[in-house]
Amino acid sequence: MDGVRTLLLTITGKDRPGVTSRVFDTLAGYGVEVLDVEQILLRGRLVLGVLVSAPRDWRALHADLSAVALELGMQVELEHGAGDNTHRADGRTHVTILGSPLRSRAVAAIAGRIADTGANIDRIERMARYPVTAIELHVSGADPDRLRTLLAVEAATQRVDVAVQAANLLMRGVRLVVMDVDSTFIQGEVIEMLAAHAGCEAEVAAVTERAMAGELDFEQSLHQRVALLAGLPESVFDDVYRDIVLAPGARTLVRTLRRLGYRFALVSGGFTQITDRIAADLGIHFTAANRLEVVDGRLTGRVSGPVVDRPGKAAALRRFADEAGIAVAATIAIGDGANDLDMLAAAGLGIAFNAKPVVREAAGTAINVPYLDTILYLLGISREEIEQADADAGVTTPSPPV
């Protein structure tokens, strides 16, 4: 194709039914070969670009297209060239920007940093307008790791969230999503809810905060906190479970990705008496958590079996990936505390969700809005697709307050 004469036709104007059909009907009369097509619609304005082989009588084609455009109230431009569309450079990357609101200054800054690396933005599309604005940039000619590091700094400056992922087949296949539970999949900390029934919530909360910030050894802090629960009746699990509130968008995230065949796991430093019930209610495939020892109907203040700590979470991710037959590179880990760091590092995509500073700084991707289903936008799934799938299933997509 390098030496073949080609024409780039650009048709712009107010959209109406039949524009694309009329344009291609006109092209059909000249027997041209269609090499590339791109069409976008933004608030009723259409931009249609068509790259075709140049016919011998290109002036007549231009005249005919101009007549069609005039009839439709549109404009047409024609540009001569040679060969096919320019091949996109290697280093193809998807960059997703989330903002609430998303300001033009932030988009300019992110685009500027991409340009600084010598990369090119080939395409931009909106993934969501609610509950946050999310846009996806298709970038070529970038090193994903370098771009991720550069954009993380800019995202913090602009107070937006940015995710950088290499564009490859893993993004299109079935994946395993491994989620922390406390303050990630659910709001609050189960151990603090249990402690409230023992009258020591403030004491336990203070230790939890330090452990999640990485200031205390997790296993030691867990034993210290669990000891304060000794004597509570086993029925306290029912009381706590009734009070649990899922993170906004948690059900939407699971419901949507289960339709695509994704597998899910809850990996928690919390307790199986709660995580197993959450998994059963939502159809989550795997769980790993600690088990509070119960003797004669009361908590002993001890944990049964080995503790699921920071290394244990990463080991669980690898184990579940193996059981599901999914490559570790195709896993997604989501967490907020220091005990999630190994799991986030092990996953193909590690996401710090409303996380402690030490976790945000270490994770490759950070989301700082309270909606768990925004992760769907990072996976290339738009809000429109989510709502349509729900409507087809007779489900109303929840609309959380913004």
Image: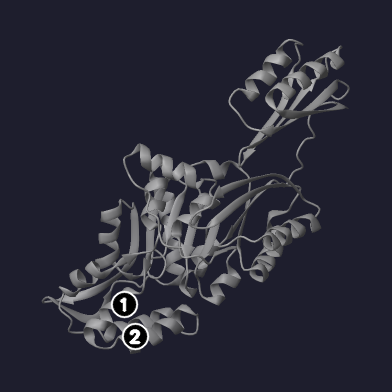
Q: Position of residue 338 (x, y in %)?
A: 49, 74
Q: Compared to 155, does 174 lie above or below?
A: above
What residue appears at the point 34 percent right and 55 percent down from the top-left corner?
A: 286
Whichever of callouts 2 and 1 sits on the residue coming sooner in the sequence is 1
Displayed quadrant of residue 200:
bottom left
Amino acid at pointer 1:
Ile
Question: Which residue is nearer to you in this view: 296 or 332?
Answer: 332
Report which residue position mark 2 lands on: 204
Q: Position of residue 133 (x, y in %)?
A: 56, 55
Q: Position of residue 208 (x, y in %)?
A: 40, 82
Give the crowd class for mark 2: few <14, some 14-19, many >=20 residues within 10 Å. many
Report which residue position mark 1 lands on: 191
Amino acid at pointer 2:
Val
Q: From the viewer's perspective, is 343 left or right of 87?
A: left
Marks 2 and 1 close (CB-CB < 8 Å) = yes
Q: Position of residue 92 (x, y in %)?
A: 69, 45
Which residue is most to the left? 296
State which quarter of the image contains the N terminus: top right
What residue appears at the point 15 percent right and 73 percent down from the top-left corner?
A: 235
Give the crowd class for mark 1: few <14, some 14-19, many >=20 residues within 10 Å. many
Give the Cα distance between marks 2 and 1.
8 Å
Q: Secondary structure at mark 1?
A: helix
Q: From the viewer's perspective, is 7 left or right of 307?
A: right
